[in-house]
Image (cartoon, helix red, strand yellow):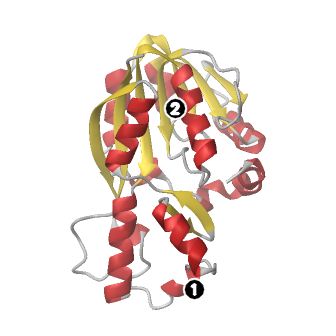
Amino acid sequence: MNRSYWEKIAPEYNSEIFDVLFNDKRSIIQKEIQLIAGKNNTVLDIGCAIGKWLPLLSSSFKKVIAIDISKENLQIAKTIHSELSNISYERIDMSGVNPKIKVSEAAICINALLTDSEKKRTQFLTNLSKCVKKKGKLIMVVPSLESSSLTSIIRQKWNPDKDAHKSIIKKKSSLQVKNMLQGNIAIDNVFTKHFLKEELEILLDQHGFNVTKVEKIEYNWNTEFSKPPSWLKFPKPWDWMLVATKCA
């Protein structure tokens, strides 16, 4: 996923990109944001896209810095939320070298660390570490590799959607295996990084964060299958949410 991809998809973002805010039916992420809120603090919305989280952040923090790689996304967000006066918008590539980002007391990163490039992910996390103050708070949500594997097993065993194979990307088997071992899963023909819980805990630790909470953000099975069988209820598919404190 590069800048051109996000610029292209921006006008159709609502229909093309999974809405975490809408599908988090228990409002787990919203509750965590309110726990780290501070009326005298600045929060970074890293990978803000078209700004679904901005109203909540605007009311919970003194200042919000909305960061995204896509100029088009930022323009849409700015237009939608023109009434929110405490938000600034910055076009920044978090996978770039030494981006200029205000060091802040808090940051949220909701399904923004998605690139299938390990090099870019490492640079992203390096930059993220630099822009959160010591003792600052981070809320990060990422796709779950465990959940993706469970979905794959259900698809192969029970085949809820008879035409599911049509959405599987056509690649050489060696490339498929390589991507699977790295946690890169094809979604709509785009390889997207999925994380093991322990993998992300290790990564955040290596970048100066102490993980204080890990929780599943559960979704309904109709987010995975067009026609999920009635017996398919629990466990539900999920993303991982991690809350962390900057310790170094």
- Dot 2: element: helix
| Label whose residue precedes the other's in the sequence (1 or 2) | 2
Picture residue at 31% right of the left edge, 34% below the top = 31
Q: At which x and y percent is residue 25? A: 33, 51
Picture residue at 75% right of the left edge, 47% below the top = 3
Closer-to-camera residue (100/7): 100
Q: Is residue 221 visible?
A: no
Any mark on residue 166, and which?
1
Amino acid type, callout 1: Lys
Q: Quadrant of residue 66?
A: top right
Q: Is residue 126 left or right of residue 92?
A: left
- In this view, which residue lies farthest toward the top? 40
Q: Is residue 82 visible?
A: yes
Do the numbered discs 1 and 2 sit on residues whose CB atoms are within 8 Å?
A: no
Q: At which x and y percent is residue 69? A: 70, 40
Amino acid type, callout 2: Pro
Residue identified by numbered label 2: 55
Q: Quadrant of residue 51?
A: top right
Q: Is residue 73 above or below residue 17?
A: above
| Cα–Cα span, label 1 and label 2 | 38 Å
Q: Quadrant of the N terminus?
A: bottom right
Q: Quadrant of the C terminus?
A: top left
Picture residue at 76% right of the left edge, 50% below the top = 7
Q: At which x and y percent is residue 221? A: 34, 70
Q: Is residue 109 above or below residue 235?
A: above
Q: At which x and y percent is residue 198? A: 32, 46
Q: Is residue 245 left or right of residue 84?
A: left
Q: Is residue 115 left or right of residue 151?
A: right
